[in-house]
Image (tube, helix red, strand yellow):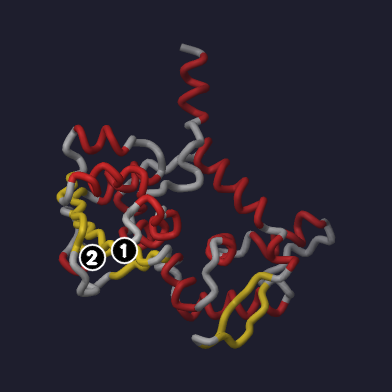
Amino acid sequence: MRGYGQFCPVAKGAEVFAERWTPLVLRELLCGSTHFSDLHRGVPLMSRTLLSLRLKQLEGIGVVKRKLGARGPEYHLTEAGREFAPIVEHLGEWGQRWFRSKLGKEELDVTLLMWDMRRNIKPDAFPSERASVEFNFSDQPASKRTWWLVSDRGEVDLCATNPGFEVALFVTTDLRTMCRIWLGDLPVRSAINSGQIELNGPRELRQRFERWLGLSGFAGIKDGRRATTSSFA
């Protein structure tokens, strides 16, 4: 990690936190990812080599602790690492309020979206038995078009290949629409009523979809620029 050549505590903190990709790696660790493959799914554009390097650097300064788990090596935040939680949260809040994504094509990533969605799914809103939901993104290439979220006994898994379970609900939409819903810019009911998202399956499951689908933790934050503009209108 490059230093700023200053003893200032802000500079020292920035040497760790402001290193490229580090805030996103910390975000994934704070969200509960502990295995290398899961961490990489949260930062798909980061090379695996660089992710490995960042984890080693964070371990070296005492922010991350590596230990052997049942499924191989695991990465956990230390007390020092967990203290980054409010910084990451405030950074996300600021970004959603003042530098909201315009959802340009270069920012849309279906893998990241589905991985994020998996974390906030509310399985208790679906029947107690296993339920598989198939998402079809009409604007994506065949290799990334179809995804499955499987809820089973309170756990939710994300599958990029057909898990072989009977599908309880089919969801058809495009990536930009689903990102807008996830970020709270488009209400689920409005998207359904306008045909931007189509649900096919039993009526009970279609009615539960809005409850079952969790949104981003930043979805409730209003656009500060729009509010400021409105106040001077």
Position of 21 relative to 54 (above/below): above
Quadrant location of residue 67?
Answer: bottom right
Q: Secondary structure at mark 1?
A: loop
Q: Which residue is mark 1?
A: 129
Q: Residue at x 61, y 64 (%)?
A: 19
From the image, state whether disc 1 or disc 2 is nearer to you: 1
Left or right relative to 34: residue 174: left
Instruction: State the image coordinates of residue 122 (x, y, percent, origin top left).
Output: 41, 53
Classed neighbour count for the residue bearing mark 1: other residues with Cα under 10 Å, few (<14), some (14–19), many (≥20): few
Residue 56 tag number? none
Q: Position of residue 60 (x, y in %)?
A: 71, 79
Q: Amino acid at mark 1?
A: Glu
Residue type of the residue flagged with mark 2: Lys
Q: CA distance from mark 1 to mark 2?
A: 27 Å
Q: Earlier in the sequence, mark 1 or mark 2?
A: 1
Left or right: 231, with 62 as reference point: left
Q: Nearer the viewer, residue 70 or 75?
A: 70
The residue shown at (33%, 35%) is: 187
Q: Quadrant of the N terminus?
A: bottom right
- Asked whether the beta carbons under mark 1 and mark 2 sit within 8 Å of each other, the answer is no
Q: Which structural element holds mark 2?
A: helix
Q: Furthest residue to the right?
A: 7
